[in-house]
Amino acid sequence: MVETAFTPWSALAGGVLIGLSAVVLMATVGRIAGISGTLLRVLMPTDRRESLGRLVFVVGLIAAPAIWMAVTGTTIAQSPPDAGSLVVIAGLLVGFGAVLGNGCTSGHGVCGLARLSPRSAVAVGVFMATALATVAIARHVI
């Protein structure tokens, strides 16, 4: 299994860019940068005037790896699981969790915690505990 290499500097740079983009979105549009809500409103728009901006945001998320490879000439190392069904099940569980938690990790973790939202603090605690348990089980039990 190939694992994605973790480097503190690239993680720090990514975190700064995510935080900066959330601040810019809030300052310019007055919206929270939650990915699940943004994607939902792209698929089921409620306000046509904001649909283009949300669509550009989602396209940017999808296109970012291709843009990175075009600019740097390097590929992004990833190690998807061999079982495609596992990816589908995981995606459905994450989607269900985002709906149940009324937001996703970006909405609660980046924007909610920055606003000192108690609901976001609980949601992030649940996300992190679930992530830790999943990794522990996947690496040490299965």
Image (spheres, rainbow, N blue to C red):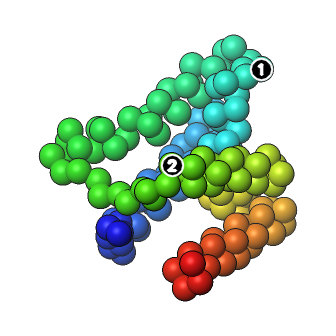
- Front position in the image: 107 or 80: 80
Q: Residues within 10 Å of mark 1 (few under 14, many from 20)?
A: few
Q: From mark 1 to mark 2, how far is it between C-alphas?
A: 33 Å
Q: Check contact, mark 1 vs mark 2: CB within 8 A.
A: no
- Front position in the image: 134 or 141: 141
Q: Is residue 92 above or below residue 60?
A: below
Secondary element at tag 2: helix
Describe residue 12's horizontal placement relative to residue 96 as left or right. Answer: left
Describe residue 57's horizontal placement relative to residue 46 as left or right. Answer: left
Q: Position of residue 134 (x, y in %)?
A: 63, 73
Q: Position of residue 129 (x, y in %)?
A: 70, 76
In the current view of this chain or complex, which residue is farthest to the left? 73
Three-letter code for the amino acid on which mark 1 is drawn: Thr
Which residue position is annotated with label 2? 84
Which residue position is annotated with label 1? 46
Q: Residues within 10 Å of mark 2 (few under 14, many from 20)?
A: few
- Front position in the image: 102 or 134: 134
